[in-house]
Image: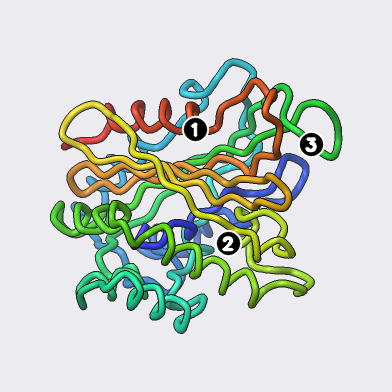
């Protein structure tokens, strides 16, 4: 997770190819659970133990509403890259805006505290009433990721930054900078799909909501909202011990009568993941 939500972005809707390739059997296990440009994952017994925890914590189909279905296998963590690799300048400006200390800056730039990174399968749920180009109901993409950090203190420090009163404004400017940079490209990076149409970057707003989860854990919901189109991309974060879990939902189109609350869905899924996470 680092400090910048968005490294983990849901795959395209059913019928398209996954945005990250499946695990390559020729790679070592360490390489298969290391994000692109991140320090190599831990190894040996520690890796096997933490991999078991991550797989247990991640979402599965039974966690989702009736009618949901799996639409793609878990994507490869190697397709994810730290924001310091994607756009070092924008990441540095974000870190400066947030007034982050040196240790947190290294997490922003290179996910320096991460020892492995594992995603769930990609799921789709039908959200009645959600505005969609293809009809009255939209397939909403849901996925989770679990990062394991070196220490619980590092994980706690990561999520604490999201609770900063500076986060919403700093993150808004960060995402605008990235979206502006990629507007007009024929194949923009998947990391920007979750903020909707890049043409609407000028109206981007970042909003945060505190979430209540069981036990001594911290959780937060983040909404990246495009005011011109009414589209939102939702992410939930929960930290428990060395576990940093991220849930992505959307993008979701506008509609006050859509009969579907992404915020409620993310909060309920955060509670499920929190109960499965060791403290």
Residue 147 in percent (x, y) is at 33, 52
The residue wearing badge 3 is 132
Question: Which picture quadrant has residue 138?
Answer: top right
Q: Is residue 110 visible?
A: no
The residue wearing badge 1 is 263
Along the viewing direction, whichever of 185 and 161 lies nearer the viewer: 161
Along the viewing direction, whichever of 259 and 218 lies nearer the viewer: 259
The residue wearing badge 2 is 191
Report the residue at 15% width, 34% height from top: 216
In three-dimensional space, the C-alpha distance between marks 2 and 3, rounded to whole angstroms, equals 21 Å
Question: Which picture quadrant has residue 176?
Answer: bottom right
Q: Secondary structure at mark 3?
A: strand
Number of labelled discs?
Answer: 3
Residue 183 in percent (x, y) is at 71, 72
Along the viewing direction, whichever of 153 and 70 lies nearer the viewer: 153
Position of the C terminus by quadrant = top left
Residue contact between numbered discs 2 and 3, judged by CB atoms under 8 Å:
no
Disc 3 residue crowd, few under 14, some 14–19, many 20+, Cα 10 Å? some
Q: Mark 1 or mark 2, which is nearer the start of the sequence?
A: 2
User: Which of labels 2 and 1 is toward the front?
Assistant: 1
Residue 140 in percent (x, y) is at 65, 35
Q: Mark 1 or mark 3, which is nearer the start of the sequence?
A: 3
Position of the N terminus by quadrant = bottom left
User: Which of labels 2 and 3 is toward the front?
Assistant: 3
Residue contact between numbered discs 3 and 1, judged by CB atoms under 8 Å:
no
* Residue sitting farthest toward the bottom: 89
Report the residue at 33% width, 68% height from top: 111
* Residue sitting farthest toward the top: 66
Disc 2 residue crowd, few under 14, some 14–19, many 20+, Cα 10 Å? many
Q: Mark 3 or mark 2, which is nearer the start of the sequence?
A: 3
On screen, residue 232 versus residue 188, left or right, reads: left
């Amino acid at each position: 997770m680092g400090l910048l939500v968005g490294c983990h972005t849901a795959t395209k809707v059913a019928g398209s190819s996954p945005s990250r390739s499946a695990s390559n059997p020729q790679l070592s296990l360490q390489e298969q659970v290391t994000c692109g440009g991140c320090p190599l994952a831990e190894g040996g017994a520690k890796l096997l133990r933490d991999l078991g925890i991550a797989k247990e914590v991640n979402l599965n189909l039974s966690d989702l509403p009736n009618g949901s279905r799996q639409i793609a296998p878990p994507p490869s963590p190697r397709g994810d890259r730290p924001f310091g690799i994607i756009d070092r300048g924008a990441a540095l400006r974000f870190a400066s805006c947030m007034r982050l200390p040196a240790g947190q800056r290294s997490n922003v730039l290179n996910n320096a505290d991460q020892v492995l990174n594992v995603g769930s399968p990609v799921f789709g749920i039908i959200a009645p009433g959600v505005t969609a180009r293809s009809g009255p109901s939209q397939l909403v993409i849901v996925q989770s990721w679990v990062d394991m950090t070196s220490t619980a203190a590092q994980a706690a420090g990561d999520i604490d930054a999201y609770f900063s009163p500076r986060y919403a404004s700093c993150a808004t400017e960060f995402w605008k900078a990235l979206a502006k940079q990629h507007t007009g490209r024929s194949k923009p990076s998947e990391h920007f799909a979750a903020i909707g149409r890049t043409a609407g970057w000028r109206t981007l707003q970042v909003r945060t909501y505190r979430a209540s989860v069981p036990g001594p854990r911290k959780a937060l919901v983040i909404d990246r909202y495009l005011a011109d189109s009414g589209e939102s991309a939702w992410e939930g974060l929960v930290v428990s011990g060395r576990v940093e879990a991220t849930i992505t939902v959307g993008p979701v189109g506008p509609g006050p009568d859509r009969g579907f609350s992404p915020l409620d869905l993310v909060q309920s899924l955060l509670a499920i993941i929190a109960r499965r996470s060791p403290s």
